[in-house]
Image: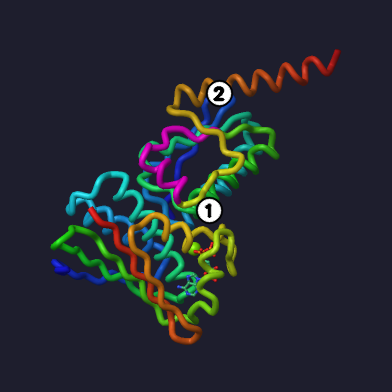
Amino acid sequence: MAVVSTENVPVKTEPDVVTVRRRVREVSSQLGLSLVDQTKIITAASELARNTIIYGGGGSMQVQTLNGPRVGLRLTFEDNGPGIPDVDLALRDGFTTGSGLGLGLGGSKRLVNEFEIFSKPGAGTRITITRWK
Amino acid sequence: MEKIPILKMGDFLLVTIQVDMHDRLALALQDDLTRTISQTEAHGVLIDISTLEIVDSFIGRMLSNIAAMSRVLDAETVVVGMQPAVAITLVELGLSLPGVRTALNVDAGMELLRASVKATKEMYGSRLH
Ligand SMILES: Nc1ncnc2c1ncn2[C@@H]1O[C@H](COP(=O)(O)OP(=O)(O)O)[C@@H](O)[C@H]1O
Ligand SMILES: [Mg+2]
């Protein structure tokens, strides 16, 4: 797998969620993802960026474009926040410790082709999502 | 702070969302609409989201909240113009937009609002006899 480009986007304040959506739209459209696939990964990114800010206390999004053998877009959201004590529970639809609908983690997992989560109490959270062309 | 305009058209309020809303702007719209419904005694709210590129769980919750609050204030809400890609994504995300009525475009939405206001009037009218 070849990484063609890498870029970091800050995810610290609420307006950064809009920046994240705009950037993911630009890159996924440049890669030639279908409109539906673009919409899916932008929506997933919006959910994860909001979590990074609200629960993770802010962090960043790494954008990687992939090529060879397949073309795809990989996004990594990372924060040094409190971490998630029970990842399986957090992934369940409807589970929230805040005031959301509890669909962000489970929903974004359904919207992408690959979903990886590393989280430990005290060690922050890192979530990587990939959507292939 | 920027604001999303609310237009009054007879008995109805019309909102066209034309920017990528950050969360606070979405919450402000929810509050503004609730206040405007009660001030104007509008009986219908039409929200045009045809330029929205995504609806995530936050915006989805805002739409459900607006529908629920307008109902309490005796107004019907119709969301119009959702793009097919957005609708497909919503379903996969797991959002069902409880209580939100939808229509394909502004005309169909207006039709739905007129019909529902008429039905309400007739219901109250028949109760008087
Ligand atoms: N980056 C994060 N850091 C710490 N906890 C998180 C993070 N992301 C998600 N969580 C936890 O997982 C739960 C579920 O997240 P999510 O599915 O997005 O639902 P919601 O945002 O509506 O709470 C959150 O309520 C929170 O407890
Ligand atoms: Mg969330």
Using the image, determine if residue A89 lies above or below residue B81: below
Label 2 or label 1, whichever lies nearer to me, is 2
Q: Nearer the viewer, residue A45 or B6?
A: A45
Q: Quadrant of residue A86?
A: bottom right
State the residue at coordinates (39%, 43%). B86
Q: Nearer the viewer, residue A126 or B73?
A: A126
Give the residues drawn in magenta, as a range: B78-92
Q: Are marks 2 and 1 on the same chain?
A: yes
Tag of residue B112? 2
Where disc 1 sits, the SS reads: helix
Using the image, determine if residue A121 lies above or below residue A28: below
Q: Nearer the viewer, residue B40 or B50?
A: B50
Using the image, determine if residue B47 lies above or below residue A93: above
Look at mark 1 in the image and give the residue it sits on: B27
Disc 2 C-beta below 8 A from ligand 1: no
The amino acid on which the numbered mark 1 sits, given as a three-letter code, is Leu
Of the residues under marks 2 and 1, which one precedes in the sequence? 1
Q: Quadrant of residue B51?
A: top left
Location of the N terminus of chain A (image quadrant): bottom left
Q: Report in which chain the residue with disc 2 lies.
A: B
- The location of residue A120, given as percent across then percent down, is 47, 83
Disc 1 C-beta below 8 A from ligand 1: no
